[in-house]
Image: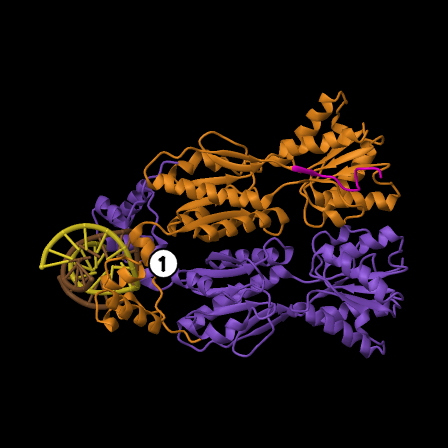
Chain colours: A orange, B purple, C brown, D yellow
Amino acid sequence: MNHNKRATIKQVARLAGVSTQTVSRVINDRPDVAPETRERVQQVIEKLKYQPSALARSLIQQRSFTLGVVTAGLKFTGPSRTLNGITNKAEELGYALLLEELLQFDTDNIKPLLENLLARHVDGIVWAVPEVGNNHRWVDEILNDVPVPVVFLTMQPRPGVSTISVNNYDGGVLATQHLLDQGCHQIGHISGPQDWWEARQRKQAWQDTLKKAGVIVAEAHCAEGNWSSSSGEVAFEQLLLSYPKIDAVFVGNDQMALAVLQIANRRGLRIPQNLAVVGFDNFAESAYFWPALTTISQNHHEVGCRAVQELVSQIEVSRRDEKVEPQHVLLTCELVVRDSSVVP
Amino acid sequence: MNHNKRATIKQVARLAGVSTQTVSRVINDRPDVAPETRERVQQVIEKLKYQPSALARSLIQQRSFTLGVVTAGLKFTGPSRTLNGITNKAEELGYALLLEELLQFDTDNIKPLLENLLARHVDGIVWAVPEVGNNHRWVDEILNDVPVPVVFLTMQPRPGVSTISVNNYDGGVLATQHLLDQGCHQIGHISGPQDWWEARQRKQAWQDTLKKAGVIVAEAHCAEGNWSSSSGEVAFEQLLLSYPKIDAVFVGNDQMALAVLQIANRRGLRIPQNLAVVGFDNFAESAYFWPALTTISQNHHEVGCRAVQELVSQIEVSRRDEKVEPQHVLLTCELVVRDSSVVP
DNA sequence: CTGAAAGCGCTAACAC
DNA sequence: GTGTTAGCGCTTTCAG
């Protein structure tokens, strides 16, 4: 690496014997430049390997073509697949991304982070942090002071704010109904942490679906984990004690379901004959669990894509000084049937 | 969201009855401001919710406190854990991140991407794309034109370039030696795609370790996958045919190892009695496979952290117009012994 | 078709 | 202590 400075528009102008404005016209493909002049300027540009400064442009045009992305838990598969969708769509639409990661899901100290993004003149923000505890309280308090559009992912819909989420409730219904359809009647649940909106939705769906089918639901039929496999292990042990007659379990995510499978295997519980298992997420490895895991597929990638799409369209609208109409998007899940729930 | 414009330093100055210079001094905590003046300015700043523009600062200071990050395959666990380390360290050191994702690992069309980052005046670049095929050819061709320091992750060390990688060769030795230590003699290998540097290192270590132990190695003892579980399935089926006497297998990553476990379970092969299995990665779920997977732990997070640390220190050095000395860091792996390789 | 002047929001260098 | 001037790299506006 030789660390030369970058060439400036001034240097190009001087070397081409024109004014900076003419160079500007060339790099912006304006029509009103004489062909020969354009040619000459082009050659100097290539010779100096000149690249216009997006920074200077952002400053004068009051527009940076940069989006802020705030995420959390990148080491987990969901958030990183969502980010994957965000980067793909942003690239497609010609926006750069400024990335920030919260150290914890339930921080509400987000001001410095937000100011960091705004100081860099992002045109809009994707808030890709799921709703946990009170971590979205700031929305009511300071969102009004944010001078650019914001789109929220995986957040309980609320008026005046755009949200894009997966329909976790429907997913929970699909899972529970599937177990009922297999002839199971003692259907337990291992939930995610109940301060997570998604976890509450899935649990509620489990309860409602069972009630609707005339099955009695008790708190003893449910145990709570924290999404990790090790917490799934603990929760399942507990569930086996509090609900000995259990013949099926809807597990809040695939990681915890994996632990359920391992314990069942270790104890000689046959799956699905003695215990049918359904997970949630359809993460890349679920098809290779032992036995292969029936699960609910949610499209994290699509959530990210839609978020960027929606955000960019809001940016366009607000640039025209029109009023932004908040949207609430709920993406549907799909049931993926595998060996862990269906007797051959 | 009401989309007010942001306040400028000029507005603050006027309202406080001082010059912009004085405001500048206040927001930069310079000592030479009268206490009362400082107080008055502070109040106006708060009243207007003024935030200095990092963009304008970057322009004049020729320094953006922003790093470019180029990644690929965010939907996989390795790259996203590395990114996790990068964001953590960058935040700690006060740098923002501009994120780009390659759509494929082996693209060599990286010029537009690079120019995008440079146009936004990044102070340095973390190239977090593993070396695959010829995807690093550009390093020899155009790295010289890049005016800022670049640090490469997971790349074969080469002179004049800073690299940070995990020692895949040592990891492969650990895995193979462990299987030898368990008394296995027919040790097969399922490798990653051989255009990946990491995959070649692991395979080479397997070969060398066996030879050193006096065990004959044949190409029939190895099958190649593409890192995915489904490719692991195919490779293992093939290996069972080409190497029927196999009593142990070192699998190139945990995803493929998961498929090996599933097939073994399905066929009634006992693990580890009939077949000992060792994976590579120690990804979050390996401990809950059935049986729990022995594997090589590599610290992706640490790779990301070290990369940012090294990059920032290079930025400091090159700002002082000193010569940057390229570093080659090789992080060590660890063997994590679980049920898939050790007879109880 | 082309250029001169002004300014985006900020700070460095110098004056007073 | 504080203000003035100049300028980071670019585009907008207006003259010619």
Assess whether residue A51 is covered by the magenta stretch: no
Amino acid type indicated by mark 1:
Ala
Closer-to-camera residue (A110/A274): A274
Q: So how many labels did they put on this image? A: 1
**Residue A148: in sight, yes or no?**
no
**Residue A141: in sight, yes or no?**
yes
Residue B289: percent from left, percent from top: 78, 51
Residue B243: percent from left, percent from top: 85, 67
Question: What is the quadrant of the C terminus of chain B in the image?
Answer: bottom right
How packed is label 1: few (under 14 Cα within 10 Å), some, or many (20 or more)? some
Question: Is the residue B154 above or below the residue A247 in the image?
Answer: below
Seen at 69% across and 25% down, the residue is A208
Segment tinted magenta in the rendering:
A334-344
Residue B232: percent from left, percent from top: 75, 58
Task: Identify residue for label 1.
Answer: A54
Assess whether residue A341 is covered by the magenta stretch: yes
Give left or right: position of B89 versus B263. left
Seen at 74% across and 69% down, the residue is B172
Question: Is the residue B99 above or below the residue A2 in the image?
Answer: above
In the rendered image, which quarter is residue A242 located in? top right
User: Which chain is mark 1 on?
Assistant: A
Is label 1 in a helix, a strand or a loop? helix
Residue B61: percent from left, percent from top: 33, 63
Q: Residue furthest front?
A: A35
Closer-to-camera residue (A74/A242): A74
Question: Is the residue A193 above or below the residue C8 in the image?
Answer: above
The main secondary structure of the magenta stretch is loop
